[in-house]
Amino acid sequence: MISIVKRHSFTKSKPFTKAPGEEAARVKNQAYRMAMLFDFYGDILTPRQREFYDLYYNEDLSLAEIAENYGITRQGVRDVIVRAEAAMTELEDKTGIIRRFHKMREQLGELEGALSEARRLSERRGQDEDLERQFARMQEILSQLKQE
């Protein structure tokens, strides 16, 4: 006969608690991630996926509310949304467009900081109109890139 010894009781352990605000930050990050996916890849979705995704994430309707409005089950709505998320996530994993977008925004911020520092150093050493025109042109290009 084999005896089994229970070394740890998983049911009597202390409940896991998150730091205050951690759950809210996670939800906010998740909502931001879903919005970015939809903005970049929403056009690849079927009209039904796009509609359900928009209602769920942007209009804040529950699965039950969407299901009732379309005459299908809550699970059916969830399946459509999960497939939409999977398709967009897979495309992002393959292309990395959102990741590159964030990297580019970060680099534009660094360029803007370097330009400001160069302008400050130039002003300390004396005014040069040609240099100021070039700084203004660089600032204009940076502003245009940030808008795109």
Image (cartoon, rainbow, N blue to C red):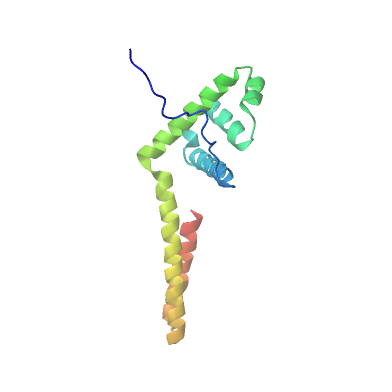
- Residue at 41% from the left image edge and 53% from the top image edge: 103
Given the current orientation, which residue lies at the most extreme left position? 1
Q: Is residue 4 above or below residue 131?
A: above
- Residue at 56% from the left image edge and 42% from the top image edge: 23
Q: Is residue 8 above or below residue 19?
A: above
Between 37 and 146, the residue placed more toward the observer is 37
Between 40 and 10, the residue placed more toward the observer is 10
Given the current orientation, which residue lies at the most extreme bottom position? 126
- The picture places residue 63, in percent across and down from the top left corner, at 61, 26
Q: Is residue 110 above or below residue 1?
A: below
Quadrant placement of the N terminus: top left
Given the current orientation, which residue lies at the most extreme top position? 1
Q: Quadrant of residue 61?
A: top right
Residue 70 shows in this picture: yes
- The picture places residue 19, in percent across and down from the top left corner, at 56, 46
Q: Is residue 68 left or right of residue 137?
A: right
Q: Quadrant of residue 15?
A: top right
Q: Is residue 24 above or below residue 43?
A: below
Residue 127 shows in this picture: no
- The picture places residue 39, in percent across and down from the top left corner, at 51, 41
Count of marks, rendered view? 0
